[in-house]
Image (cartoon, helix red, strand yellow):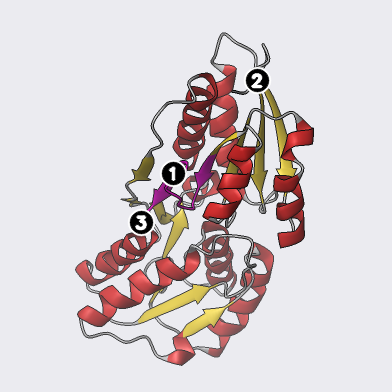
Amino acid sequence: MRSLRKVPKICVCSPHFASQAYYQRLRGIYNYLNSLVIRVDIHIRIISSQEQLDTFINTLPENKVDGVIFISLSLTDENVMKVKAAGVECVLIENQSELCTCITNENFEGGRLAARYFLDHGYQSFGLLCEPFHWAYSVYTIQDRIMGYQAELGAAGHIIPKEHIYESKINRALVRERFVEVFRKGNYPKAFFVPADVMAIGLIQAAYDCGLKVPEDVAVIGFDDVDAADFMELTTISQHLDESGEIAARALLDKIHNPNTVEKHIDLKLTLVERKTA
């Protein structure tokens, strides 16, 4: 059995250091740990390749870490077994394994929620802005969100034409620049689902740049519910980012102090937050 130090040492690993969603999950982790009477050392590790992920896992015995929270990283059961063989507990966020505690949400259902909202509010012309790029070592949740959106629209008899499916990197400035061109050319859909808030904000800014009204001329639903979504009055799908970080930190410490604790699969229910962009 692992000999636990008086001050537990945990590491948070993620491929998305610059993303607002990562920051809010990290904030939830920190707020929970900061509320405890005991001290916990927390370390941050950014993973930028499959090689870095493999190296991190293989060198865990040397790093004297008690636990790891893996955010949005694609760990296999073999990876999890290696982590546990090193005497380290782990919790996964946005990934699943029966071998450890996992915190997920129904991304497919989130896409369906967005589509259902548009349908219930009488929209007839639908668009989609997505980020098609992903890395093998990270979890690609956007695809499930897109599939849910398209499935719900399809069930209602609406198929999004190819010319109304737009692609961009998850970068607000790039989206803003791209959609200034789209809006000025015309022939754009009335209702956009954008499965990442930062992209949705760029699209809204482009609409304002072109003198369009939101949601009268262009309606937008995002996904994540980052802090800026409230500031921009963005209607979005909330995946309760801070809460997921807090739950992960609590579950990890429980496991560190009580290794026989049963592994759990915690599915956070998504909610649609109605503001003023749709």
Tell me: 253 left or right of 144: right
| Start-end of magenta stretch | 91-105
Give amino acid for label 1. Ile
- How packed mark 1 is, by other alpha carbons closer than 10 Å (few <14, some 14-19, many 20 or more), is many
Tell me: 264 left or right of 89: left
Q: Where does the C terminus fall, quadrant-wise? A: bottom left
| Residue 134 point in image, percent of width and height | 62, 69
Q: What element carries label 1?
A: strand
Give amino acid for label 3. Glu
Residue at x 35%, y 64% (from the top left corner): 108
Q: Which-is-in-front pick, marks 2 and 1?
A: 2
Picture quadrant where residue 145 is located: bottom left
* Mark seen at residue 106: 3
* Mark seen at residue 103: 1
Question: In the rendered image, is residue 45 in sight?
Answer: yes
* Mark seen at residue 2: none
- Reply above or below: 42 against 227: above
Residue at x 52%, y 19% (from the top left corner): 257
Q: Mark 2 — residue? A: 8
The answer to whether the residues at label 2 and label 1 have Cβ atoms under 8 Å apart is no
Residue at x 37%, y 41% (from the top left corner): 266
| Residue 161 point in image, percent of width and height | 40, 90
